[in-house]
Image: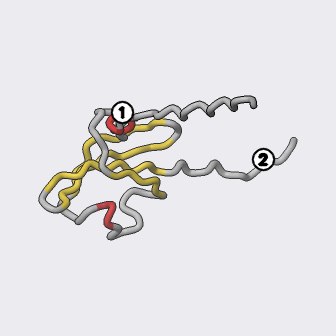
Amino acid sequence: MKRQKQPAKPTAIITDSAKFTPRCPKCGAVISLQATVERFNEPYKWDFWGRAGERWQRCKGEAGGYQYIHFRTLFDGRFSERLAWIKPTPAPTTQEALL
């Protein structure tokens, strides 16, 4: 009787989640929440934006074709670092007339 070979054990890959923590592209601060939006502060009164008077802008810039704004909010007595990725405005699709 021929003995069958045991299948190889799967390889366990242990990852450190800190390696994949989102960070601000400009200052490197650890980001708690991020979202892709049409415009800053829209939709109005969305929990992501925090409350009026408890939001401070930290950085802004461009990365990967998107504008971003890094801001800080006060949430449950603690600061929360957030990043709003603003969708690029599509280029007009009008075509010039041929001469």
Image location of residue 47, percent across then percent down: 31, 66
Screen quadrant of the N terminus: top right
Q: In which image quadrant can residue 78 be found?
A: bottom left
Q: Secondary structure at mark 1?
A: helix
Image location of residue 66, percent across then percent down: 49, 43
In this rendering, is residue 40 above or below 18? below
Number of numbered discs: 2
- Identify the residue at horizontal 51%, vertical 36% (top origin): 64
- Identify the residue at horizontal 45%, vertical 43% (top origin): 67
Q: CA distance from mark 1 to mark 2?
A: 49 Å
Q: Secondary structure at mark 2?
A: loop
Provide the residue designation for mark 1: 19
Q: Is residue 64 left or right of residue 60?
A: right
Provide the residue designation for mark 2: 96
- Identify the residue at horizontal 22%, vertical 65% (top origin): 52
In this rendering, is residue 26 above or below 66? above
Which amino acid, by three-letter code, is at mark 2?
Answer: Glu
Q: Earlier in the sequence, mark 1 or mark 2?
A: 1
In this rendering, is residue 73 above or below 8? below
Neighbor class of circle 1 (other Cα within 10 Å; few <14, some 14-19, many 20+) is few
Q: By what rule are the colours in the image chosen?
A: secondary structure
Q: Is residue 4 left or right of residue 99?
A: left
Screen quadrant of the C terminus: top right
